[in-house]
Amino acid sequence: MSETSPRYLVPFDPKRVPHYFADVLVIGGGLAGLRAAMAVDKQLSVLVITKDDIKQSNSNYAQGGIAGVFDPEDRFEDHISDTLSAGGALCDPRVVEMVVREAPQRIQQLVDWGAQFDEVSGELILGREGGHSARRVVHALGDATGREVMRAVIKRVRSVSNVGIWEDTFTLDLLTDDGTCRGALVWNRQHGKTLVWAKQTILCTGGTGQLYRETTNPKIATADGHAAAYRAGAELRDMEFMQFHPTVLYIAGSSRSLITEAIRGEGAHLVDKVGHRFMPEYDERAELAPRDVVSQALVLQMEKTRHPNVYLDLSHLDASFVRSRFPGILAACGEFGIDITIDRIPVRPGAHYMIGGVTVDEEGRTTLPGLWAAGEVTSSGLHGANRLASNSLLEGLVYGAHAGAGASRCAAAMQDDFRALPLENRAVEQPAEPLDLSDIRNSLKSLMWRAAGVHRSGDQLEDAVHTIDNWRRYVLLRQFQDPLGWELQNMLIVADVIIQAACERTESRGVHSRTDHPETDEENWQCHLAYSR
Ligand SMILES: Cc1cc2nc3c(=O)[nH]c(=O)nc-3n(C[C@H](O)[C@H](O)[C@H](O)COP(=O)(O)OP(=O)(O)OC[C@H]3O[C@@H](n4cnc5c(N)ncnc54)[C@H](O)[C@@H]3O)c2cc1C
């Protein structure tokens, strides 16, 4: 155990905290977590824990949709090959095949549970997104798929009697004994700390976007699950692969809303500060090039023009079409006095999707016995070095179902044993000087943006290793009282792993773009980087 990284974040004494027992504990109530909860045998008790209101998840904000082969003209083989070709030779072909073939049935299950996808005459409308060779993306409410899917799934889970949900409850750490996960230490404002003992635990805590100054992710995405799994001894893999979304609304004071790539699909141009349309100079597919190519071009153009953003221009498109096709973006920009049918929309890239995570096998088993995982917190081998659009909700559905079923099977085979284990973590003496946590958090987010952003270089990454190490020395040894401190500790632990991995991978592949190693090096780097403590 490293001196700067204690095993548990806070002190606890089993004689002084309440205990709760569940057959299966699911940490996270996004799509992956709720799908996992639904897959557990109804005879078993399930507890789902969410850090905030259950509606606050990346799943809820998903826009474009979920990919699956429905069109008779489309083929599983094509969805598989599109996924593999996006993934830069790092996908696991068996995983890709399994997920793609399961997609239609998993999406149909959502329809059976009441999710209303956009249809015409009873047929699903299938959208086409960057990297897909066919129309295969089901969507809902136009550009608010996540909201509709989560509405239906939350309603369904609430109607099931064996599943309990604790909202506004922060998972601090996974409990381990004898190399096995035994549940989690959780905290909420009303009851303080509780030890939740579970026969099997499923981690579904989502992404890490909040590590970056610019991100599409909501506030909950602070890498807590990645950090807790790492502290508990599980393996993290592929952490250098952070996908950036090229077009995030960039208005001071606004939330960093994602501007869907469908807007470029419908003909919007990317222009710089003088109105020059630059994408054709970077890629022959122009605005329709893959996300990583567009993000990298945007950053170069911003540097060239010394301007903090570029713009999306829709003024040449039919105004009534724009209004009806993009009602969400129209409203969001309208609040800041931007009429998207006339005015240019300021955008820049933002951290969007963490491809790396807790290593899982095809059933969702992690390297730590008793711990399963699903969704964005994992590295399953589906995405390789670059995620194909609309494949991540799908991954959450498939792996949620697998992990739920696997954990259920194992829990059912175990005896009821309502005993707390004598685990304890002692309080340590605290330095007298208080820390300005917001200051460190903002500095970390800026550092990650500069050093581990769209473009990376060895020099900057090495500097970042030292800076983060310095912050870790005095932040990780403290024991904080509330989520602000715990989130910062988690962010520092995971930032350190991302930076180390980005530093180690001396090539460019997928979303990992090294200015000092611009080529892909198949001979030395067609492999995964894995870290565990
Ligand atoms: C703006 C946006 C648009 C997107 N659009 C699409 C799209 O169109 N198609 C697509 O496939 N993907 C899309 N994605 C990606 C996709 O939404 C996510 O990858 C996916 O929803 C992740 O699901 P999840 O269940 O793994 O995590 P989440 O949905 O993020 O859920 C995480 C859960 O974990 C809980 N949690 C986190 N930390 C703790 C803690 N310490 N204690 C307790 N609970 C905790 C949270 O409260 C939450 O309930 C989009 C993402 C964003 C941000």
Image (cartoon, rainbow, N blue to C red):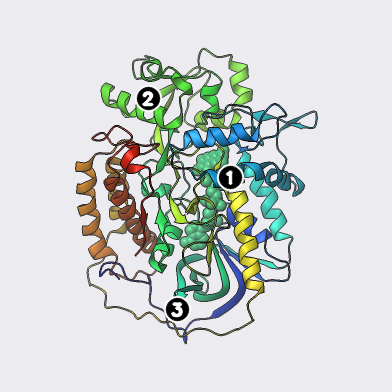
Q: Residue furthest front?
A: 523
How far across and how far down the image is residue 475, in percent? 28, 64
> Callout 3: few (<14), some (14-19), or many (20+) C-alpha neighbours within 10 Å?
few
The local secondary structure at tag 2 comes to: strand
How far across and how far down the image is residue 17, in percent? 49, 81
Of the numbered discs 2 and 1, the one sitting upstream in the chain is: 2
The answer to whether residue 449 of the structure is visible from this angle is yes
The answer to whether residue 309 of the structure is visible from this angle is no
Q: Does 3 sit left or right of 378 as displayed? A: left
- The answer to whether mark 3 is within 8 Å of ligand 1 is no
- The quadrant where residue 88 appears: top left
> Callout 1: few (<14), some (14-19), or many (20+) C-alpha neighbours within 10 Å?
many
- The answer to whether mark 1 is within 8 Å of ligand 1 is yes
- The quadrant where residue 274 appears: top left
Query: What amino acid is labelled 2 in the image?
Result: Val
Spatial CA distance of label 2 from label 3 is 54 Å
User: Badges 2 and 3: C-beta atoms under 8 Å apart?
Assistant: no
Q: Nearer the viewer, residue 342 or 502?
A: 502
In the picture of the structure, the residue carrying the numbered disc 3 is 178
Query: What amino acid is labelled 3 in the image?
Result: Asp
Q: Nearer the viewer, residue 74 or 447?
A: 74
Of the numbered discs 2 and 3, the one sitting upstream in the chain is: 3
Q: Is residue 183 above or below residue 359?
A: below
Residue 310 is marked as 2
Spatial CA distance of label 2 from label 1 is 29 Å
In the picture of the structure, the residue carrying the numbered disc 1 is 393
User: Badges 2 and 1: C-beta atoms under 8 Å apart?
Assistant: no
- The quadrant where residue 471 appears: bottom left
